[in-house]
Amino acid sequence: MAGGTPSHVPEEDPKAPPSEEAIRPVRAMTLQDHAREIVFNYVVAQLEKTNSEIRFDPGDVLVTWFAYVLGNWKAMVTTNLPDGMYYEVTHNALRKATFLDAYKKCDDVSYPDTGLEFM
């Protein structure tokens, strides 16, 4: 063809594994789903002990922050319950284990940056 443009571009092999770029968003979402599931199950167990009349669904669990580095990952997770709780879900790839830390928010204090110089 004129201009050196090939007349046929070969299709990708359907049996070939997807590229890392193609699967990264899916993998990250799967890990976030796992973090939400861990928090959901924890909160349901706590509600069964304290107040089983509260309606709580998996959609009520939200990931507010997520990071994935070298096989390890961490998610900051909250719920729409008015209990002031937030959760840190951490996966340690070396230990092949995921940990849940539950925190109660006590204060939200703001400190102005007056007089400070940032680079």
Image (spheres, rainbow, N blue to C red):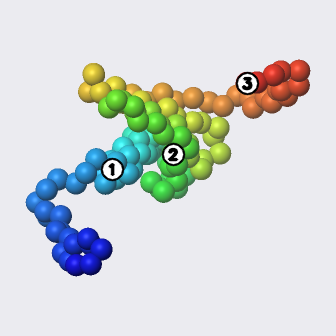
**Of labels 1 and 2, the one closer to you:** 1
Task: Measure the alpha-carbon separation of dots 3 and 1.
Answer: 33 Å
Helix, strand or loop under label 1 = helix
Sequence-earlier tag: 3 or 1: 1
Query: Where does residue 76 sit, x and y in percent of width and height?
Result: 52, 37
Residue denoted by label 3: 119
For the C terminus, the image quarter is top right
Q: What amino acid is found at the position of numbered circle 1 in the picture?
A: Glu
**Real-space Cα distance between discs 1 and 2?**
22 Å
Q: Is residue 72 left or right of residue 88?
A: left
Q: Earlier in the sequence, mark 3 or mark 2?
A: 2
Numbered badge on residue 21: 1
Q: Which residue lies furthest to the right in this view?
A: 115
Q: How far apart are marks 3 and 2 (CA)?
A: 30 Å
The N terminus sits in image quarter: bottom left
Number of numbered markers: 3
In the rendered image of this protein, does residue 91 appear above or below residue 26? above
